[in-house]
Structure formats: structure tokens, C-alpha cells
Image: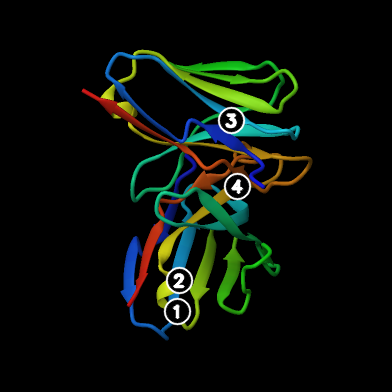
Amino acid sequence: TQLLEQSPQFLSIQEGENLTVYCNSSSVFSSLQWYRQEPGEGPVLLVTVVTGGEVKKLKRLTFQFGDARKDSSLHITAAQPGDTGLYLCAATQGGSEKLVFGKGTKLTVNP
Amino acid sequence: GAVVSQHPSWVICKSGTSVKIECRSLDFQATTMFWYRQFPKQSLMLMATSNEGSKATYEQGVEKDKFLINHASLTLSTLTVTSAHPEDSSFYICSASGLAGGPRADTQYFGPGTRLTVL
């Protein structure tokens, strides 16, 4: 059973389009992180959300944490080829430091 | 800030040999370091959690005698794959989180990964 369900698993879009990636669970999380990983490299932290309903923006990226802290979304506006990569959501529960990862969304932005 | 390095970045070895991978936090002290493995086109799978000065805690299904972890200092953890076999070929990634109460606490900072190929 996958604790964190990410969708879609694959996404191929044209430059300039908008997109949303979802991360859902039936469990409540203490915090949720979004990472971006490029082939052959480690994940790079984009954002951490901890408060239900929280919205954070990072340039063209908007991150939202659900009110009940069970789900999150990542919205990219006017996607660019440089946004291509594997987007991973990961979460912690209770007082644990352990991160549970979703399966990831492989995004390809075509010029 | 919050830079984590891994060495080597890639290694090729023969079946039956042992390989050591180092994970260092370069600009902060890490109470806890984590080791993950990632198969092609898959997500990260936690192998073990290591705290400085104590034994590592392994996830279910991970053989502690095969994957030896040593967390010798607040800036260095090592993973040794003993008697490596082709099925151990994978991308191994470490992460580190800072001292409790500090600016790097509660967040894992990832290394660039080590590609292990066992022939």
C-alpha cells in the first residue's frame, strides 16, 4: 500500500502551459515536502509545508497543503523546458523524522 | 548553505567485493543521516536511519549485515555494501538533517547520489 499517492505519474506538455501535480493520502502528516530530482542527481528541496491550508509560492510554482493536512498540490504556471524533471512529494508523520516518498511525477516540458 | 556531498559519485565493482560510500554534511552538523536507494524510474526507498554515535536503524527487509552503516561524526556517515552482487546495483542517496533546534533541523538535505554498478 502506497502511503502517498502522486498523480499523474507522467506528464508531457508544451512550453507555456499550466499544470498541477497532486499528492494524496488518507493519513494526516506533520509536514510535507516537495522535491525536484534530475537524472543522476539527488532530490533538491523546493518547499516544506506544515500548516493546514498553507499556500507557498516559489516564482512560477505554487504549493498548497490541504486543510486537513492529508494532501498537497503543486501548480506550475507557464511551464518552461527547464522545469523538466521528476517531482516528488514526501511527508513525515507524528514525531518521526522519516520521510515517506510518493512515486513521483515525471514532467517533460517540450519547447 | 546545507550542502551534502557523497563520494564516490559512481563506482563499478566486481561481484563479491565490498564498496564504501561516504556521505558528508559540508556546512552544518547532522544529528541524523538517512540512506536511500533508488531503482531506475522509481522513487526513493529508505534503507536505514543513522544517528551519530549509535547503531543504525534499518527498515524492514534491509539486511544490516549486508549494508553496514557507520555514523562516526556529526558530519560523516558511511554505507558499506558488503559482498556486492549485481542485484545491489542501484542509485544510493544519503540525506542529512541538522541538530535539533537549529536552522537545519526537521528538514532532510540530500546528497547527489552514488551510482553503484556490480558486474
Q: Are marks 2 and 1 in contact (CB under 8 Å)?
A: yes
Q: Are marks 4 and 2 in contact (CB under 8 Å)?
A: no
Report the Cα–Cα distance between label 4 and label 2.
26 Å
Residue under pointer 2: B88
x 45%, y 43%: residue: A43
x 63%, y 38%: residue: A4
- The mark closer to the camera, 3 or 1, is 3
Q: Amino acid at mark 2?
A: Asp
Whether callout 4 and callout 2 share a subunit is answered yes
Q: Are marks 2 and 3 in contact (CB under 8 Å)?
A: no
Residue under pointer 3: A23
Which of the marked residues, 4 or 1, is nearer the chain's N terminus?
Answer: 1
Q: Is residue B84 left or right of residue B9?
A: right
Q: Is residue A37 left or right of residue A109?
A: right
Q: Quadrant of the C terminus of chain B?
A: bottom left
- Res. A49 image quadrant: top right
* Residue B84: image tag: 1
